[in-house]
Image (tube, helix red, strand yellow):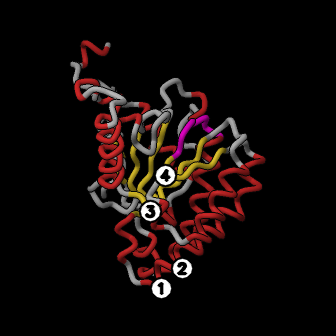
Amino acid sequence: MTKSNDISIEQHENLPRHVAIIMDGNGRWAQARGLDRSEGHTEGVKTVRRITEAASCAGIEYLTLYTFSTENWNRPKAEVDALMHLIVIAIERETPDLIKNNVRLRMIGDKSRMPEEALNRLERCIEETSGGTGLTLVLAISYSSRWEIVEACRRIASNVTGGGMQLGEIDDKVISGNLSTAGMPDPDLLIRTGGDMRVSNFLLWQIAYSEIYVTQTYWPDFSEQDFHDAIMSYAGRQRRFGLTGEQVK
């Protein structure tokens, strides 16, 4: 990985544990080149591989990629079918390398909406990488944060009405423990490619105090150097969590 700074990512003392990325701009990348939108998604898969490798080498513990939102089901059927096929094929192809590089695969999202064959194939890949102790690669597929929060509320309400806990025991830890990201640290850094200034229903609860980095670069063009720049931008920031700068110091 080419680095513009004298100090490499893995040598820096202020690294994020968890990086989340909204991978935007595949379609616009393709259209700008007179290509079908599917070509952009295909090129975007190559970027996933590059950035996963960069995150693993840098010592990032969790990398969560917004792969397919629940809203994406409303896209034209041909594009949805092509995306599902591409996601499954790409994950199956990369699974041997994930195992080799000690990467553990995880999926968050509404599995009930997934085509059965695609879900079964994805879950096989997840099982095959379950022994990984390095980077955890989290794919948000058929995911929306509002769906996730509603599901968490339903589980908590069921627990209360069933006598498993008291209403007064509900706090932020209980809610976090009922989200699909339970057991994971909240993202320290949220990266969005493609230039749009919104979070698009992604990890709304979890990114409450995440640092945000937006780049105009479309996802297919997002390089290891771009990732490095985002990490170094994070490393130079002061995270105050509601305190003053003097208190943090």
Instruction: Evaluate if marks 4 and 3 touch, with contact meaning CB atoms under 8 Å apart.
Output: no
Relative vertical location of residue 195 with respect to residue 81 in this rendering, above or below? above
Asked whether, in this view, residue 57 is left or right of residue 179, the answer is right
Between residues 112 and 222, which one lies in front from this camera angle? 112
Residue occupied by mark 4? 108
CA–CA distance between discs 1 and 3? Answer: 17 Å
Magenta-drawn stretch contains 180: no
Residue occupied by mark 3? 142
**Type of amino acid under label 4:** Ile
Residue occupied by mark 2? 82
Indicate which disc residue 5 carries. none
Q: Sort mark 2 into few (<14), some (14-19) or many (20+) by Cα contacts within 10 Å.
A: few
Asked whether, in this view, residue 21 is left or right of residue 53, the answer is left
CA–CA distance between discs 4 and 3? Answer: 8 Å
Percent x, y of residue 182? 46, 37
Q: Which label's residue is closer to the chain start, 4 or 3?
A: 4
Say which quadrant the C terminus sits in. top left
**Type of amino acid under label 1:** Ala
**Type of amino acid under label 3:** Ser
Between residues 224 and 147, which one lies in front from this camera angle? 147
Magenta-drawn stretch contains 62: yes
Locate residue 86: give its quadrant.
Answer: bottom right
Q: What stretch is highlighted in magenta?
A: 57-63
Q: Which label's residue is closer to the chain start, 1 or 4?
A: 1
Where disc 4 sits, the SS reads: strand
Q: Sort mark 1 into few (<14), some (14-19) or many (20+) by Cα contacts within 10 Å.
A: few
**Type of amino acid under label 2:** Ala
Q: Which label's residue is closer to the chain start, 1 or 3?
A: 1
Percent x, y of residue 133? 68, 35
